[in-house]
Amino acid sequence: MSQETFEAIRESGVVAVLRGVDEGDPVAVTEALIAGGVDVVEVTADNADAPGTIRRLQSAVGDEATVGAGTVIDGATAQSVIAAGAEFVVSPSSHADVIATCNRHGTLVAPGIMTPTEAAEAYEQGADLVKVFPAKTVGPDHVAALRGPLSQIPFLPTGGVDPDNAGAFLEAGAVAVGAGSALVPGEAVANEDYDEITRRAERFREAVAEAREH
């Protein structure tokens, strides 16, 4: 694992999930997020050309942002996004070949889990973080309950996270949260309303700061 990548995620407190950004300008979207204080972005592998988008972002804002890939569910896809420059890989579920591929390349990997057994198994296989997904279904109390016996595992709740509940997840012990449409709404991307994306990023960062003061 890249400790630098892990620290970037923890420092940001928010991983912006960029799904469908190929329909707009992913560089402009990422620049808007950076302006709002969110400098970790995840390009989902179901984008039309995820490796190409990752390369574009690394070229344009690689010095200002940490760029990774999400929705990676097989080793071949993990290999392709890592080759394109992904600094971390996230999955909605846990796949041993994805974890192994990332470990082989020293790339941070965060598989998706829901139960204590899944979290422990993923971590034993080499996960660096585990993505609690979908987080909104179970809420912050579930993260706190997982953290009880599994305090050695860093958690990244994702799915239904917004500025109103992000702080609660962090207070429950999460290292950071992942956020998609609540942070980067498709309408704002389509309308090139980058100020709105910046405002949303600022709200998330405020929630993170408030939670960490407690």
Image (cartoon, rainbow, N blue to C red):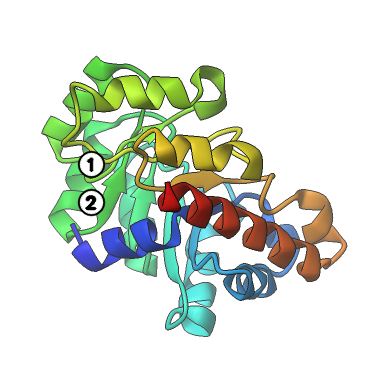
Indicate the secondary structure of the residue bearing disc 2.
helix
How many numbered discs? 2
- Out of 54 and 152, give the one closest to the viewer: 152
Check the picture and name the quadrant holding the N terminus.
bottom left
The percent position of residue 132, horizontal first and vertical second, equals 40, 30
Q: According to the image, label 1 marks what residue?
A: 99
- Residue at the farthest right position: 191
Badge 2 vs badge 1, beta-carbon distance below 8 Å:
yes
Q: Amino acid at mark 2?
A: Cys
Tell me the distance, in whole angstroms, between the alpha carbons under discs 2 and 1. 5 Å
The percent position of residue 61, horizontal first and vertical second, equals 51, 80
The percent position of residue 28, horizontal first and vertical second, equals 68, 74
Question: Would residue 2 be found to the left or right of residue 166 on screen?
Answer: left
- Residue 209 to residue 112: above or below: below
Q: Amino acid at mark 1?
A: Ile
Q: Residue at 21% across / 48% down in the picture?
A: 101
Q: Is residue 134 visible?
A: no
How many neighbours does mark 1 have within 10 angstroms: few (below 14), some (14-19), or many (20 or more)? many
Q: Residue at 47% across / 27% down in the picture?
A: 140
Question: Would residue 91 be found to the left or right of residue 190 on screen?
Answer: left
* Residue 73 placement: quadrant: top left
Question: Would residue 78 be found to the left or right of residue 103 on screen?
Answer: right
* Residue 191 placement: quadrant: bottom right
Q: Which mark is residue 128?
A: none
Q: Which mark is residue 102?
A: 2
Indicate the secondary structure of the residue bearing disc 1.
helix
Q: Is residue 12 visible?
A: yes
Q: Residue at 23% across / 16% down in the picture?
A: 117
- Out of 182 and 164, give the one closest to the viewer: 164
The percent position of residue 2, horizontal first and vertical second, equals 21, 63
How many neighbours does mark 2 have within 10 angstroms: few (below 14), some (14-19), or many (20 or more)? many
